[in-house]
Amino acid sequence: MRKQFKRMFTGLLFSLLTSGAALAQGGTPSAFGPGEQARYRVQYLGMTAGSAQVTVGAPMKQWGKEVWPIVSVAKSEAVAGVWPVKDKYVSYWDFGTQRVLGSDMHEDQNNKRRRVRVKLGEDGRSALVVKQKEGEAPRESTHELVEGTLDVAGATFALRNRSLEVGKEFAYPVFTGSRNFLMKAKVEARETLDTKLGKQEVYRLRVYTEFSGKLQSKRDMRAWFTADARRLPVRIEAELVLGSLVAELTEYQQGKVVAPAPAVTARNGT
């Protein structure tokens, strides 16, 4: 059970909370920028299981291009009774072209370490994946992608720079590092939500994913985004095969406001 929860905790945190990309709408400032920092408390079966901190870093060079490193750190809590987890996920967002260039995952779970690097091709239609366990040789594989593919985090937070209105639907091709699928989201309602940062006007979204195994959902996930210009995720709920998991925003620091590049639209979105 501990091993199952460890994998579920880490996988879900990064799939839901890391902001790997945002599809900006031309002329509208990005909903987030360098310097933004958000911290979430994660509960499993009503018990505090850990936390995740998401930081939009200062512009840097990666693979010869200027990117925003989106750095997410997930930690398990000792009271959760699980193996110690401290993982870091970095997604490289090219703000100039509005696309993800790749990512690095650094896993440290129960003192066992692993690294996974994903680098997208120049045309955005392929990915080189390098996986390496500590003490072992790296393993490489190549994958074909649909043009415009994002990582899971990128597709999730692409919604932050979209105009949210009740009834709108979005779809994004996603690559997890091993498989492709289409992530879908529908804005179901606008409502008021009590949060750790006070009452917030929010949009409630239903999100469809294709996670499998212990991350498989018994029903679609639900997410609440603020109805202001930040469109900030303040709560996420998932009902998994091993139980319910809730992530709540507890701290937030706004980043730099940056004007976007020309618009990039979601696949089948509006």
Image (spheres, rainbow, N blue to C red):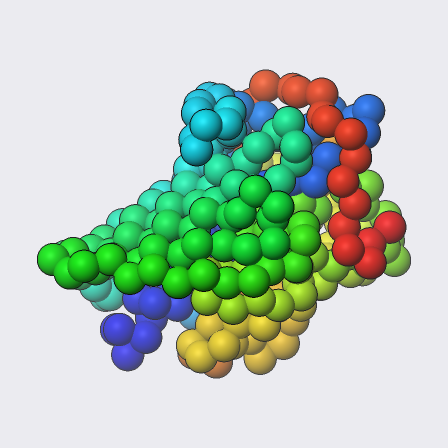
Tell me what residue is drawn at x 34 percent, y 45 percent.
88
14 horizontally vs 181: left or right: left
130 horizontally vs 135: left or right: right
Quarter occupied by residue 202: top right
Q: Is residue 150 visible?
A: yes
Residue 253, percent across and down?
Answer: 52, 26
Q: Is residue 245 visible?
A: no
Is 36 situated above or below 236? above
138 or 160, which is in the foreground?
A: 138
Residue 240, percent across and down?
Answer: 50, 75
Tell me what residue is drawn at x 82 percent, y 58 percent.
268
Taking the view exactly as shown, the residue that stands out farthest to the left is 135
232 horizontally vs 41: left or right: right
Is 181 situated above or below 200? below
Looking at the rendered structure, the number of numbered marks drawn on it comes to 0
Q: Quadrant of the N terminus?
A: bottom left
Residue 222, percent across and down?
Answer: 65, 62
Is 269 situated above or below 238? above
Residue 162, percent across and down?
Answer: 77, 42
Quarter occupied by residue 24: top right
10 or 106, which is in the foreground?
A: 106
Tell me what residue is drawn at x 71 percent, y 21 percent.
259
